[in-house]
Image (cartoon, grey):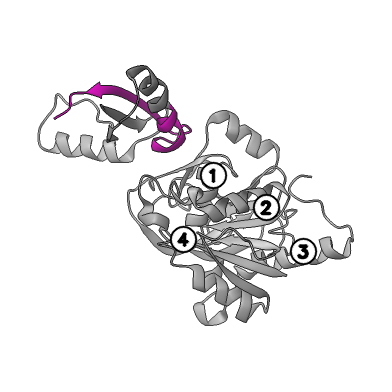
């Protein structure tokens, strides 16, 4: 079983890297780009647990380790095995 | 006073701190390996600067899982003095021993330069040898020193006088320009509520000898040594942390 965790800055926290990417895209003429927020992706392979257990485990490790809850938020989903 | 300097893989200011404590300030000092389980009876712990675990995940995020850090946490909870410098400050934030978090510097540049910081609270164990308003010239070297705290935490920090240092100009004025990394309220260093754990981004160990251009950083180590001597002899003096 595989899950994908997405970590990004909370909306209230300034993301200077995302802003820089936005500026670069504007420089290239992509006027339709309003805003970019940069984040991190974690693809995690899990074994020996049920989907229900994964639903408890993934948010736990995201909160404890993958994201810093003071500045970051996370989202996650099951992904297809490749 | 016996100091312990914690070494993580990627620490690079560990020997600088060791040198200042042992050779400049003549204190008994030992190195503490992050995989050890024993603090060797130290009276104070220094978490040095560097790039523990390569700054992987987030600066300071992995170091807190080292076996020794469990001991450091317990030591801090017992009231032991812990000083986190630069990456050490980031580790203290990630461990939850200090409130807040670090973001990339506002200008997205690694900043390596001398800065001025103003002593905002001279009643802590880390600043009692200094004066409120005193301006120190100390170098910084970091990419993620842009201190952030949510509004409620920020209000608490100010109300409880936990802001110990602010970035300022040479005259002591806190200006937008002097706040080189964009920190909230120009915060350069904070102490915990109990007053025994402090973190700061500037490197006092790089400003403790005239040969290196400044001895302003010594006041922090000297304060700690004075605080320890006071505690040992049981004499009174200024209260720690709070007024």
Q: Secondary structure at mark 1?
A: helix
Quote the CA–CA distance across marks 2 and 3. 15 Å
Report the front residue among B106 and B23: B23
Do tags 4 and 3 sit on the same chain?
yes
Residue B205: image quadrant is bottom right
Q: Earlier in the sequence, mark 4 or mark 2?
A: 4
Q: x, y (%) of residue B54?
A: 36, 56
According to the picture, the residue beneath numbered tag 2 turns out to be B75
The residue shown at (49%, 41%) is B101
The residue shown at (69%, 70%) is B2
Q: Earlier in the sequence, mark 2 or mark 1?
A: 2
Do tags 3 and 1 sit on the same chain?
yes
Q: Secondary structure at mark 3?
A: helix
Quote the CA–CA distance across marks 2 and 1. 13 Å
Quote the CA–CA distance across marks 3 and 1. 24 Å
Q: Secondary structure at mark 4?
A: loop
Q: Secondary structure at mark 2?
A: helix
How dense is the environment of label 4, judged by Cα within 10 Å: few (below 14), some, or many (20 and up)?
many
Q: Chain of mark 1?
A: B
The residue shown at (53%, 39%) is B100
Q: Is residue B221 magenta?
A: no
According to the picture, the residue beneath numbered tag 1 turns out to be B95
Residue B99: image quadrant is top right
The residue shown at (67%, 75%) is B28
Q: Earlier in the sequence, mark 2 or mark 3?
A: 2
Residue interval drawn in magenta: A60-82
Q: Indicate which disc residue B8 carries.
A: 4
According to the picture, the residue beneath numbered tag 3 turns out to be B228
How dense is the environment of label 2, judged by Cα within 10 Å: few (below 14), some, or many (20 and up)?
some
Quote the CA–CA distance across marks 4 and 3. 26 Å
Q: Chain of mark 3?
A: B
Q: Earlier in the sequence, mark 3 or mark 1?
A: 1
């Amino acid at each position: 079983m595989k899950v994908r965790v997405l970590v990004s800055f909370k909306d209230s926290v300034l993301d200077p890297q995302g802003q820089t990417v936005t500026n670069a895209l504007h420089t290239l003429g992509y006027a339709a780009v309003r805003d970019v927020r940069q984040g991190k992706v974690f693809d995690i392979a899990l074994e020996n647990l049920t989907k229900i257990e994964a639903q408890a485990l993934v948010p736990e490790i995201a909160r404890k380790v993958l994201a810093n809850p003071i500045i970051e938020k996370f989202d996650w989903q099951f992904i297809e095995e490749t | 006073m016996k100091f312990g300097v914690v070494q993580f893989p990627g620490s690079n200011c560990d020997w600088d701190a060791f040198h200042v404590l042992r050779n400049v300030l003549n204190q008994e000092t030992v190195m503490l390996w992050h995989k050890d389980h024993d603090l060797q009876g130290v009276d104070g712990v220094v978490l040095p600067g560097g790039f523990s675990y390569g700054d992987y995940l987030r600066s300071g995020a992995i170091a807190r899982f080292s076996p020794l850090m469990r001991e450091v946490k317990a030591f801090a909870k017992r009231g032991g003095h812990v000083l986190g410098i630069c990456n050490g400050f980031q580790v203290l934030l990630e461990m939850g021993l200090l409130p807040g978090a670090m973001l990339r510097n506002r200008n997205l540049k690694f900043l390596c330069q001398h800065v001025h910081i103003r002593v905002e609270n001279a009643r802590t164990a880390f600043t009692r040898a200094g004066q409120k308003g005193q301006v120190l010239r100390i170098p910084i070297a970091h990419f993620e020193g842009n201190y952030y705290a949510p509004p409620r935490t920020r209000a608490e920090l100010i109300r409880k006088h936990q802001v110990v240092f602010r970035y300022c100009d040479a005259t002591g004025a806190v200006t937008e320009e002097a706040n080189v990394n964009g920190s909230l309220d120009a915060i350069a260093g904070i102490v915990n509520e109990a007053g025994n754990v402090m973190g700061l981004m500037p490197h006092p160990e790089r400003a403790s000898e005239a040969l290196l251009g400044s001895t302003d950083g010594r006041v922090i180590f000297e304060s700690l040594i004075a605080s320890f001597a006071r505690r040992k002899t049981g004499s009174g003096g200024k209260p720690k942390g709070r007024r």
